[in-house]
Amino acid sequence: MPKQTKNGISHRQVHRWLVIIILIFSGTVVYATLRLVGTFWDITEASRQNSELQNAAHELMNASDYLTEQVQRFTVGGETRFMDQYFTEAFESQRREEAIARMGGNDKTEAALAKLQEAMDGSVALMSREYYAMRLVVEAKGITEYPAVLDTVTLSEADLALTPTEQMALATQMVLDDEYYEQKDRIRTAMEGSLEEVEKLTQSIAEREMHSLTQEIALVRVAIVIQAVLIFFLIWLTTRLAINPIMSAVDQIKEGLPIEEKGSNEFRYLASAYNKIYEKNKSSIESLSYIASHDELTGAYNRAGYDLLLSDLDLNSTYMLLLDVDNFKLINDTYGHEVGDRILAKVVSVLNKAFRDKDYICRIGGDEFVIFLMYSGDIQHRVIESKIAQISRDLENTEDGLPPVTISIGIMDGKYASDSKDLFEKTDEAMYESKKQGKKSYTFYDDRVK
């Protein structure tokens, strides 16, 4: 520090020491800013890897669901295009194998990969049952052109002795019965376990990086404050320097706005780093809009989310199902609203299990739900009926301690509707037709109007 003389502190020495200190703190700011940017990119990279790993896990399940959908359609109608699409996915697209390979490229995901491999093994095991069902259809329909792998399937003498109609019925049963869906549930459970492991890994990385980020932000703030004080003192002692950029930045931060990138190179760099964090935080806040479009009790889309989906539908490839719980008021009065809430949550859980990830489930009223079956323009009634049968069985199952419930459903193919309003009105008509039939029923609008 400058020496004290009888005439006071030497301005030259004060200036020299202040410049040295300012240079030191300027270097600290630059260093902390570089560290801050590095940590920010580490967080971004961790988020990207998490997204890739989650996508890999979901892709395996999507591929498994796609195979299920194709084999079910083939066994229901015997159309060979569904068989071809099945084997194209299994042997050419190979999304399941790609998911395993993507997750296997990260040495930190052994636990998640093990769960994903378990799901893959379950999916492969399920294919044996699907091959047998397809072989039955080949025999029943007398199909001569089919993948060579089906030649490796040997039908039992009893099954060979069945009539073609009986063989078709057996094939359909094999891919729609409880045992089949129990295997699917085991695959889904393994996939969910993989996602949990990915989430644990990501959370650990995020916590470590956020702790580092907090420390570095604190360091940047301290360095800025000290540097600002020293610069102000130097201006007061010698000449007034350009302090407006710093003051402007303080005002912007107080107003919750990004910093204007002006002034020294160091300050511009700091402002750029701050603005990146500001924009990232702003994006995170916007993602909270999810809450506004989903029902808090069940996790399904709420009325606002339903309206948004309805406004953007491709009617030609969408089915709408409208359902409500039969005698729900009586259930509430008998068992209490807490049990009623649990039943509503169970309904959504059962619907999620029955339908695909790309379908949308909405709660539009107290016990009234809408399901949009997306990209389902060529889906057959029997496929929907089989899903409804499974849903009904699950809702009447009382192993969870809840009373059995039934539902009434209206179903409408969007290609027969003039617009989204007409789609809802006709689906609503079909549902009330089910109610008139004594509830615990479903009605296709096109059947109702015939």
Image (cartoon, helix red, strand yellow):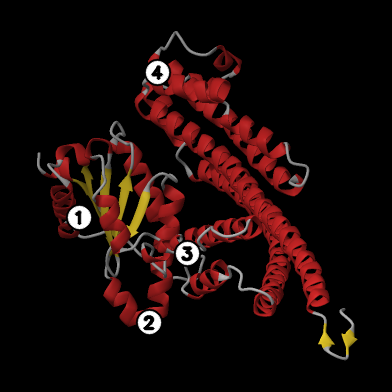
Give how far apart the Cα atoms at labels 3 and 1 are. 39 Å
Image-quadrant location for residue 173: top left
Mark 1 or mark 4: name the one nearer the start of the chain: 4
Q: Can residue 396 be seen in this view?
A: no
Give how far apart the Cα atoms at labels 4 and 2 are. 51 Å
Where does the image place residue 103, in percent across and percent down from the top left? 68, 39
Name the residue that disc number 2 marks: 336
Give the residue type that dot 1 points to: Met
Element under disc 4 = helix
Element under disc 3 = helix
Where does the image place residue 355, in percent across and percent down from the top left? 41, 47
Give the residue type that dot 3 points to: Ile
Give the residue type that dot 4 points to: Thr
Q: Residue at x 37, y 66 (%)?
A: 292
Name the residue that disc number 1 marks: 431
List the single residue furthest toward the bottom: 6
